[in-house]
Amino acid sequence: MNLSTTQSRALGDVMRLLAESTDADALREALALPMLDLMVADQYVSMVWNSSNDRFERFTAMNMSTDSLRRWDEHFRFVDPLTVPMMERRRPTVATQVLRQPELAKTEFFNDFLRPEQMHWGINVYFFDQQTAVGDFRIWRKRERGNFEANEVDIMRMVEPAIAAALGRLFWEQNAAPSQACTERAEDLLQRAARL
């Protein structure tokens, strides 16, 4: 894996932010610029999947209009052919691994949402901790930069575990994960009830 000076500096910034962060939403927002530099990309969007509501929430973005994010939430999430298959893969995924560019270019999603924002080549990663979605990154490039290649996927795979761990830690701190003792008591109760 080869990193430029800018990418090396960005990687250091990512690691520093992960170590220092005390708020998951602030972390996802602060990671925007270093992740764009690390991935040599142009647009960054991050959301959090809420499984109770079956929708993405808590949007943050860089180099993408608020109106576009609102339009995605109101309409384009229903015709988006990429998000769900990419999320199901649970690993960094280049958009063209899910849908070839010529097919994507024929969709309403591409023509009315991605193209106006100059989002041509994308890579997404969805972060999970204990089967709970704790955030995602949707990173896009303009057409002239070219698609993400194996080196960039390797970079994303390298930082993914650290980002997932940080977002997971912050999620459970904020949402008070059950203690080990509570979990053991619940298991004991279930086992006793099963014997009745």
Image (spheres, rainbow, N blue to C red):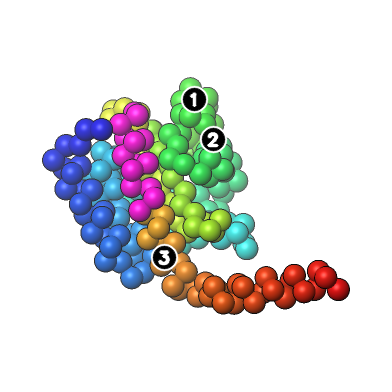
Residue 144 included in the magenta stretch of the image? no
In the drawing, does residue 109 fall left or right of residue 143? right
Residue 95 position within the rendered picture, expressed as x and y whole percent measured from the top left: 46, 34
Residue 146 position within the rendered picture, expressed as x and y whole percent measured from the top left: 31, 27
Residue 43 position within the rendered picture, expressed as x and y whole percent measured from the top left: 33, 45
Q: Nearer the viewer, residue 76 or 127?
A: 127
Q: Is residue 64 above or below residue 106?
A: below
Find disc 2 in the rendering and name its residue: 108
Looking at the rendering, the stretch of residues picked out in magenta corresponds to 149-162
Q: Among all residues in the image, which is located at the extreme right?
A: 196
Find disc 1 in the rendering and name its residue: 100
Q: Nearer the viewer, residue 52 or 105?
A: 52
- Where disc 2 sits, the SS reads helix
Nearer to us: label 1 or label 2: 1
Residue at image location 49% in from the left, 25% down from the top: 100
| Dot 2 amino acid type | Glu
Q: Is residue 71 visible?
A: no
Query: How far is mark 1 from mark 2, CA to CA?
Result: 15 Å
